[in-house]
Image (cartoon, rainbow, N blue to C red):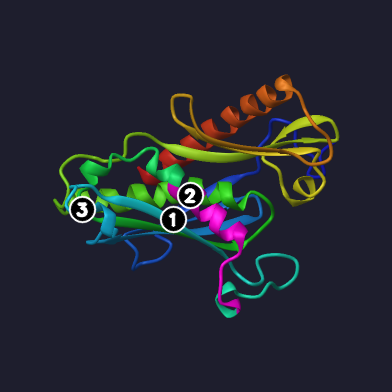
Amino acid sequence: MRPSGRAPDEMRPITIETGFTKHAEGSCLISCGDTRVLCTASVEERIPPWLRGKGEGWVTGEYSMLPRATHTRGSREAARGKQSGRTQEIQRLIGRSLRAVVDMKKLGERQITLDCDVIQADGGTRTASISGAWVALRLAVNSLMKDGLITHDPIEKQVAAISCGIYKGTPVLDLDYPEDSDADADANFVLIEGGQIAEVQATAEGATYDEEGLLRLLRLAKIGCDGIFEAQIKATQ
């Protein structure tokens, strides 16, 4: 029995509230159970120096966790003067995941930054960030197309992410904090609509697992991401 009482293939409830902030070109608040992440997309008419003159754009991500997003207060990274290795890893993952579904030439010479700020954490903050960032990106691109700044949609497909793990010997979908902190193995899957895999991060924590165990986690991830794809479409229509 999972601590939440969910079935092994049951996700936490997911909601996506768009237009959560008024200044960003695209924004949403994504809630996956008790995990809540504010995702905003900012469009800037500039690109990194190494892309100048190539007729291409850039999509990147930044990630942060508010001091009281967890059970105890964490210090702000700005106050410490540097980002943690975890933060850097997650924001690189967000950027890679979104770039996997964007045609940079169609975007033109502009940059879109996806800021993912964790308001409340209960497991799966990086995966919720990716899923919500796609919605914010979709809204920002819709705005660019409406204003005639780009003529062809640069977003080729949807991308979403979900965590899975082996908890007390059973593969389960969408780990919350109690499961994540006590899992035998945990994995984060970034999937693209149509069945393509953008990235997999899988780690044995308390016990190793075999090939079939990994495949079972992948099957669960596909179930979860299909549900997220539906929520993304509903939020952006």
Q: Position of residue 37 (x, y in %)?
A: 54, 58
* Pointer 1 residue: 61
Mark 1 is on which residue type? Gly
Image-based side of 75 in relation to 78, left or right: right
Q: Give yes or no for contact between labels 1 and 2 (Cβ–Cβ under 8 Å).
A: yes
* Pointer 3 residue: 109
* Pointer 2 residue: 94
| Upstream in sequence: badge 1 or badge 2 | 1
Closer to the camera, 195 or 9? 195
* Boundaries of the magenta span: 80-95
Is 92 within the magenta?
yes
Q: Quadrant of residue 205?
A: top right
Q: Is residue 235 above or below residue 29?
A: above
SS of the residue under disc 3: loop
Q: Position of residue 162 (x, y in %)?
A: 59, 40
Mark 2 is on which residue type? Ile
Q: Quadrant of residue 163?
A: top right
Residue most toward the bottom? 79
| Upstream in sequence: badge 1 or badge 3 | 1
Crowd tier of the residue under label 1, counting other residues whose Cα lies within 10 Å: few below 14, some 14–19, many 20 or above: many
SS of the residue under disc 1: strand
Crowd tier of the residue under label 3, counting other residues whose Cα lies within 10 Å: few below 14, some 14–19, many 20 or above: many
Mark 3 is on which residue type? Glu
Q: Is residue 177 above or below residue 164?
A: below
Crowd tier of the residue under label 2, counting other residues whose Cα lies within 10 Å: few below 14, some 14–19, many 20 or above: many
